């Protein structure tokens, strides 16, 4: 019995080893959104296409949709753009865009050149909406339900694998 | 000539100013509050830097928000709550004390207490063992008498 006590440090060490090994597999740059299951923050910002047209959070309600934060200065946004186009065209998903801290004419030119998957684009020139939404780097993609409640957040490019996850969340919130 | 040097000095000075935010505060308390908050809030993008250190665009946006709130007279708690509501508890370099962080705040003291208990127990076990060992070395009066008798006998036989 006394002999067994000598093994306590070894057991503790092995338990810590397992814990830290698990910790190594986590991605520290992936933060869970603090706004999960909260309503989309209230805002009022011009649309990208027409600076006299004001968009508010009411315009995002009605149907489950994706909200994609993007900018022309963001290389990963370019990488995911084709996938967004495909999702919008082939799967008929509503995608709202937030053009984040960007140049209006450059953004318009980008949409002309690479085609436009967005139903509507919000022009967030100084990143004020971005701060309220907890954006810390483009691209980010949110799933919102018909009532405009944020149900999921993905940071980084939307590839096929991520899209399958988003699709699952969309199907779930459509029920 | 003088004007030329002045213009030259301005050209050199330009980039130096560009890298630093220049915020004007209405009093020194506000400046201190701003400095303390940007030290204690973590940049969500470059995760091992605070807002004051980081040059990333998001950090500068958040500094601007902190400045706006400090100038409008918000308390530290209000500003911290604003950040936590958007970026989560993660942005706090000084975490709040609540159920989720009890282990973080009090864990070290618990470990210290456990360590002290173990040391005391070990010391006590050793002392009682030593006491027992010295007990067995000390013979009672009768035993001592018997031992000297045996030794005497032994010596007598060998002679």
Image: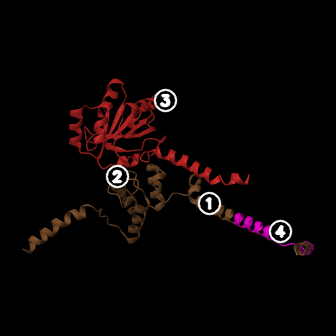
SS under mark 4: helix
Q: Is residue B73 visible?
A: no
For label 1, the residue is B111
Q: Nearer the viewer, residue B123 or B133?
A: B133
Q: What is the chain letter for disc 4?
A: B
Q: What is the chain letter for disc 1?
A: B
Give the CA distance from mark 4 to mark 2. Answer: 75 Å
Q: Nearer the viewer, residue B126 or B111?
A: B126
Give the CA distance from mark 4 to mark 1. Answer: 38 Å
Q: What is the chain letter for disc 2?
A: B
Q: What is the chain letter for disc 3?
A: A
Q: Residue furthest left?
A: B1
Q: Kindly identify which numbered label has been placed on residue A172.
A: 3
Which of label 4 and label 3 is nearer to you?
A: 4
For label 4, the residue is B136
Q: Which residues are magenta?
A: B120-145
For label 2, the residue is B58
SS under mark 2: helix
Q: Are marks 4 and 1 on the same chain?
A: yes
Which of the 4 quarters of the picture holds residue A50? Answer: top left
Tell me the residue at 62%/63% (across/down).
B112
Chain identifier, red in the render: A
Query: What's the colour of chain B in the image?
Result: brown
Q: Is residue A141 visible?
A: yes
- Placement of B33 over or under B96, stated as above or below: below
* Sequence order check, earlier mark of 4 and 1: 1
Q: How is the image coloured?
A: by chain
Give the CA distance from mark 1 to mark 2. Answer: 38 Å
Q: Nearer the viewer, residue B97 or A47?
A: B97
């Amino acid at each position: 019995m006394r002999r067994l006590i000598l093994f306590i440090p070894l057991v503790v060490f092995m338990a810590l080893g397992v814990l830290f090994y698990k910790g190594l597999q986590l991605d520290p740059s992936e933060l869970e959104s603090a706004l999960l299951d909260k309503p989309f923050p209230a805002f009022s910002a011009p649309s990208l296409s027409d600076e006299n047209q004001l968009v508010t959070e009411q315009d995002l309600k009605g149907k489950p949709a994706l909200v994609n934060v993007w900018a022309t200065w963001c290389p990963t946004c370019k990488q995911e753009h084709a996938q967004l186009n495909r999702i919008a065209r082939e799967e008929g998903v509503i995608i709202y865009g937030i053009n984040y801290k960007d140049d209006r004419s450059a953004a318009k030119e980008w949409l002309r050149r690479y085609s436009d998957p967005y139903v509507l684009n919000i022009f967030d020139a100084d990143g004020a909406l971005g701060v309220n939404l907890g954006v810390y780097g483009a691209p980010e993609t949110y799933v919102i339900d018909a009532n405009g409640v944020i149900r999921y957040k993905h940071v980084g490019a939307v590839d096929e694998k991520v899209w399958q996850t988003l699709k699952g969340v969309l199907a779930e919130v459509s029920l | 000539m003088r004007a030329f040097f002045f213009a030259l000095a301005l050209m050199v000075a330009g980039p130096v100013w560009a890298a630093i935010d220049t915020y004007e505060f209405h009093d020194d308390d506000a400046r201190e509050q701003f400095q303390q908050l940007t030290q204690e809030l973590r940049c969500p993008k470059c995760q091992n830097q605070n807002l004051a250190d980081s040059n990333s665009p998001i950090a500068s946006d958040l500094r601007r928000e902190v400045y706006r709130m400090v100038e409008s007279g918000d308390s530290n708690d209000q500003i911290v709550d604003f950040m936590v509501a958007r970026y989560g508890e993660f942005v706090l370099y000084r975490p709040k004390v609540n159920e989720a962080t009890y282990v973080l705040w009090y864990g070290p003291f618990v470990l210290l207490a456990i360590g002290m208990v173990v040391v005391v127990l070990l010391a006590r076990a050793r002392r009682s063992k030593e006491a027992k060992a010295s007990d067995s070395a000390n013979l009672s009066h009768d035993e001592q008498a018997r031992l000297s008798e045996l030794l005497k006998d032994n010596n007598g036989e060998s002679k």
